[in-house]
Image (tube, rainbow, N blue to C red):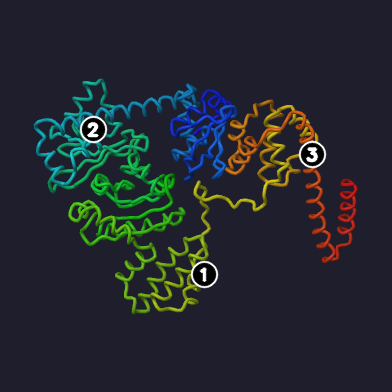
Amino acid sequence: MSVRIPENLLEDILGRVDIVEIISGYIPLKKSGRNFKANCPFHHEKTPSFTVSAHRQIYHCFGCGESGNAFRFLMRHEKMEFPEAVEILAKKAGVILPEQNNPEIARQVSLTSQLYKINELAVSFYENNLHASGASAFRDYLLNRGIKLQTIKEFHLGLAAYEWNSLINYLRSKGIGLSLMEKAGLILPKDAGGYYDRFRNRIIFPIFDIRSRVIGFGARVMDNTLPKYINSPETPVYIKGKNFFGLNLSKDYIRENDFAIIVEGYLDFMIPYQEGLNNIVASQGTALTLEQIRLLKRYTHNVVMIYDGDTAGEIATLRSLDMLIEEGMNVKVVPLPKGMDPDALVRREGVNSLKAKLQNAKSLFGYKLEVLKCRHNIKDAHGKSKIASEMLLTINKFDNAILRGEYIKRLSEEIKVPEHYILEELNKLKPNVGVRSDEGLRVKKSSLGINPAENLLIKFMLEERELIEKIMQELSPADFTDIRTAKIVSVMYDLFTQGKNIEPSILMNYLSEDDASQLVCESMFMPELLEQEREKAVNDCIARIKVQRLKSQREHLHIQIKSAQSLGDEQKLNSLIKEFHNLIKKGD
């Protein structure tokens, strides 16, 4: 979604969906007083600490701290981005998003929907071809390649017939125009006019996105015709470098095992997958892209690469290593013998052989060093220099100084060059200053605990809107010592001034920081106070926050006074002392 979604629409969506219904579609909830409880889906536990409030439309886990509203639950559980979660819940709630109000974008949305439909029709057509009576040779080819009949059906494999226009005729019979077929990448124009089918006399591998929608196709010949594989061109729904083959089937296994195996091709994926190695994806080529890595990061930060045992596979692995490291992934590599790929290995030696290799996967340091030692003479000074230069490019990608130090030590031992020379070369490299702004890297959090008075006051303001005006007259956001509570209070004041709703589930839409949203949820699940105790508690909280603010100001002024004294700045010193005495009077 390229346009900003207005806050009133987000509020409308949250007002129409029920968080209990949403979450119970994923995990079983049990009634517990006013709330619902379950074992947390975000960490392993035996005693339920995951609590859902139907009244407040929020959830909070007292074990791991995960908190949020319906949008955040979908984002966390389904590993999707905010716009995707909004789109899904908007559809469920019957809310029309801005794209659908824009005629141009509405046409694009309509085109996208039509392309998904055309692709589904093509899948059905190709599948029927493969299972027709005259296609036994193609079925036997797949079975002889080790692909089971159940797998053929599960992956919706198909057959593009030899005829030039069989798909065109089929889609025309379904009312699909040639222009849409071309936009879907299924047909090609003839030089002399007219069109013909893009895929002919080939086994068809449908490609699905993570929501199991057909977005494109791969097509393989059965003989030695070149090219062996041809793929769909890029279309409005298919960009090769942004998808993995098989991720729609393997994503839950990847999340469960907390690591993903990356292979190259369709059969490299399918053969291990059907034999029970399910936490696997195929990159559909030899080069991983940044978009693919970030997609995979939704499910795990641990990767084992198994590319083909040839020069192209070796180069692709080396190229991918640095990108994976820059994105904060933990990487290992399984090198295969020359001419071997995961498909052939599993068919010849069984899936347990591949699993054994996974157990003994090489560290990225060990793999890259081994490759470089084969390319350069490690006994020669120039060879050592080239090996060190290549290795330092990778070592420099690590943010962690301890890891860099350990790898420098190992490199020194391997090439028999003193560490200080390697460090000298490392220092010549431009510092790795790239910033990752994804969910896998969090900004360092405050080491201070939350002031209970600040937390309790947020609870009171969320429960009684009338209190906000009273508290605004007594405290500013700057009076709150923790940056997270200060941010929450600032947003609440702004919403109150604008006359907007300040429900907890809505407030979280304005908070980009996870821990700020967590504090909102924690405060709402704090024990209730009796009515007669609330007024006194509010006044006590205000008084404590004021005292803490004065204390902080005094400490800050004290530091400034000492600095002015050491610098001999009499004018500034007198001004600071006067300010310090005024603060003391305020506290009396």
Spatial distance from mark 2 to mark 1, Cα to Cα?
54 Å
| Circle 3 residue | 540
Spatial distance from mark 1 to mark 3, Cα to Cα?
55 Å
Query: Please, is residue 334 above or below residue 67 in the view?
Result: below
Amino acid carrying mark 2 in the image:
Ile
Residue 235 location, x and y as percent?
33, 36
Tally the marks. Answer: 3
Earlier in the chain: of badge 1 and badge 3, it is: 1
Question: How packed is label 1: few (under 14 Cα within 10 Å), some, or many (20 or more)?
Answer: few
Residue 207 location, x and y as percent?
29, 38
Earlier in the chain: of badge 2 and badge 1, it is: 2
Residue 491 location, x and y as percent?
67, 36
**Residue nearer the viewer, 310 or 451:** 451
Helix, strand or loop status at disc 3: helix
Image disc number at residue 42 = none
Residue 447 location, x and y as percent?
65, 53
Q: Is residue 127 left or right of residue 573?
A: left
Amino acid carrying mark 1 in the image:
Asn
